[in-house]
Image (tube, grey):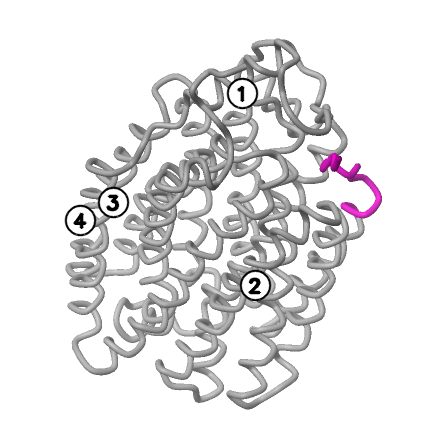
Amino acid sequence: MNDGHALGIRANLAIFLQQLLQVFLVGLTIGLQRTVLPALAESEFGVPAGSATALVAFVVSFGAVKAAMNFVSGHVSERVGRRRVLIWGWIVALPIPFMILWAPSWGWIVAANVLLGVNQGFCWSMTVTAKLDIVRAGERGLATGINEFAGYGGVALAGLATGYLATWFDPRLSLFVFGLTVVLLALAAAVLAFAETLGFARAEAARHGAGAADGAPPVYAEAPAAPGAATVFALVTWRDRTFQALAQAGCVEKFVDALMWALVPVYLVGRGASLIEIGWVTGVYGLVWGASQLWTGPLSDRIGRKPPTVTGFFVCAAGVVAFPLVGSLAAWSLIAAVIGVGMALLYPTLIAAMGDRAHPAWRGSALGVYRFWRDLGYAVGALAIGLAADLSGALAAGFWLTGLAMAGSGLWLALAMTETHTRG
């Protein structure tokens, strides 16, 4: 069936590259907060000394809002298109650099992260959804791996760059200039050079309906032909066992990123590390996570989604537990790299598995629900980590909690997930 919407990365290379630029800029936007803000929370913004719960409030606000916006953006994009939602997300981000520059208290940073959550829920979600619109089933692992490589590469580079800039120049001014430049560039690129891909998803759904799809027959979750938002939410959250396993896994894996974002910089400050050294540790984590997805995503296209995903959870659990047991920059960086490999094994494969199991007619909504639960993990994880640290009186408790949660989630996934990738 020739409908003018051929699938594949090579057939849609220009569109694919537009999407990569966007997710890289999205990564830079969130990455500018990864090194400097947590480390200066007490001295610059008045966070009470020793209060991990107050510190992680900005991650909680980000995660809760981003989770909700993932759900909203996924459903809305099936009505108005992916491009329009992307542009809305960048417009919302415009005040963030100004709020960081002028913030009189930590409450302003929490509020800025509410806007950041909207931005990320709209923009990062659309780069993922748009890629899965245009690629073949056998390229979903590769596509999501490349997408997350570009995004988390941006996170890592921004974290490292802002660590240096904040050391050389005024911390707030450097974050302001960096952030505003990125947001304006991204908005211009979204308006001028981002192709709408909703038509690809609709054409793919029509081909499947007509029995004209290529490759091995996919195994979609059972659902009505045109399910509403509530039906898709229930299907992903509890009605389908594999979807449920993927959703809980997505939620728990964000505990690791919440830990690396909010707690690790403060923990390293307490161990005597400088801003530049913190930037290197968090940067190694992000760079290894991003770069490793270039091979973990394609790996899942060859061997299936389940083996690398389950392995990734246990690798992360081991790395997180080991982190507070060492005491040098080299050792922290090495363990950060191990955690990055674990995240790379699980992160793109979870997204690809969702794309495998969700019908193209409602894939955007299903991805939105998955990303709702996944990014709610920022809020749940950050709050749990902060409470564990405060109640125990030791920041290391946040590491133990995260490692235990990752091991338990990996076990759930191993027992409940059915392989989603049909190869043939």
Specify which label sits upstream in the sequence, 2 or 4.
4
Specify which label sits upstream in the sequence, 1 or 4.
4
Label 2 sits on a secondary structure element that is: helix
Callout 2–callout 1 Cβ contact below 8 Å: no
**Image height of 140 relative to 134, above or below:** below
Q: What kind of residue is marked 4?
A: Leu
Between circles 4 and 3, the one closer to the viewer is: 4
Between circles 2 and 1, the one closer to the viewer is: 1
Q: Position of residue 181 (x, y in %)?
A: 17, 56
Between circles 2 and 3, the one closer to the viewer is: 2
- Are there few (<14), some (14-19), or many (20+) residues within 10 Å of tag 1? many
Classify residue 319 by image quadrant. bottom right
Cα gap from disc 1 to disc 4, whole angstroms: 34 Å
Label 4 sits on a secondary structure element that is: helix
- Residue 394 is at least partly visible in this image: no
The residue where tag 4 is placed is: 184
Q: What kind of residue is marked 1?
A: Glu
- Are there few (<14), some (14-19), or many (20+) residues within 10 Å of tag 3? many
Q: What kind of residue is marked 3?
A: Ala
- Are there few (<14), some (14-19), or many (20+) residues within 10 Å of tag 4? some
Label 3 sits on a secondary structure element that is: helix
| Residue 363 on the magenta span | no
The residue where tag 2 is placed is: 292
Question: Which part of the image, by quadrant, shows the C terminus?
Answer: top right
Specify which label sits upstream in the sequence, 4 or 3.
3
Specify which label sits upstream in the sequence, 2 or 3.
3
What is the span of residues highlighted in magenta in the rendered image? 412-424
Q: What kind of residue is marked 2?
A: Ser
The residue where tag 1 is placed is: 204
